Amino acid sequence: MKNRVHGNAFTLIELLLVMVILVVLAAIVVPKFAGRSEQAKKTATITEISSFKTALELFEGDNSQYPSTEQGLQALGSNVGNWQNWHGPYIENPPLNDPWGHPYIYRFPGTHGTSYDLLSVGADGQEGTADDLVGWAPNK
């Protein structure tokens, strides 16, 4: 009689099968989470633009005009133009860059039938492309 000792180890086939299952799951799950990150940045940008718009309206109400292009969005956080009726800060530490790290663009007077232009150039960093998020039209 031979005594065989059967180990409780996995076979190579079983290990390969588990690896294949993990790779398939990763291929399904990772892209879904990657898209969520981009959507979160877009939502944050839309929210920040909305906050800027509210602060700009408050600024204009106090000062009877919007900050100049040169003063920019910084005028919402500190009185960079030495405005006599400035009652800010209208936004504490205004974020000057969007979630992709590109500076928000602010221009006064506006060129889109609005008092001012306010936009994020989006992920591609190029103004005038489809991923721009703007303050003068609904963003989708």
Image: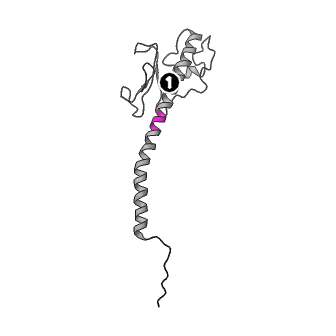
Check disc 1: other Cα within 10 Å, few if <14, some if 14-19, many if 20+: many
Q: Quadrant of the C terminus?
A: top left
On the image, the x and y values in percent for residue 117 come to 44, 18
Q: Which residues are magenta?
A: 37-41
Q: Quadrant of residue 78?
A: top right
Q: Is residue 63 above or below residue 136?
A: above
Q: For the view shown, which residue lies furthest in the right direction?
A: 87
Q: Is residue 77 above or below residue 24?
A: above
What is the three-letter code of the residue carrying label 1?
Answer: Ile
Decide if residue 56 is on the left or right side of residue 119.
right
**Which residue is under mark 1?**
49
Decide if residue 51 is on the left or right side of residue 124.
right
Given residues 59 and 35, the one toward you in this image is 35
On the image, the x and y values in percent for residue 68 come to 50, 15
- Give the image's coloring scheme: one colour
Residue at image point 46% right, 70% down: 10
On the image, the x and y values in percent for residue 76 come to 57, 20
Q: For the view shown, which residue lies furthest in the bottom direction?
A: 1
* Residue 138 in view of the camera: yes
Which secondary structure dominates the residues rendered in magenta? Answer: helix
* Residue 100 in view of the camera: no
Numbered disc 1: secondary structure: helix
Residue at image point 46% right, 43% down: 33
Q: For the view shown, which residue lies furthest in the front direction?
A: 1
On the image, the x and y values in percent for residue 38 come to 45, 37
Please say whether residue 122 is one of the residues in the magenta stretch. no
Q: Is residue 33 above or below residue 47?
A: below
Residue at image point 48% right, 18% down: 69
Q: For the view shown, which residue lies furthest in the left direction?
A: 129
Given residues 123 and 28, the one toward you in this image is 28
Q: Quadrant of residue 125?
A: top left
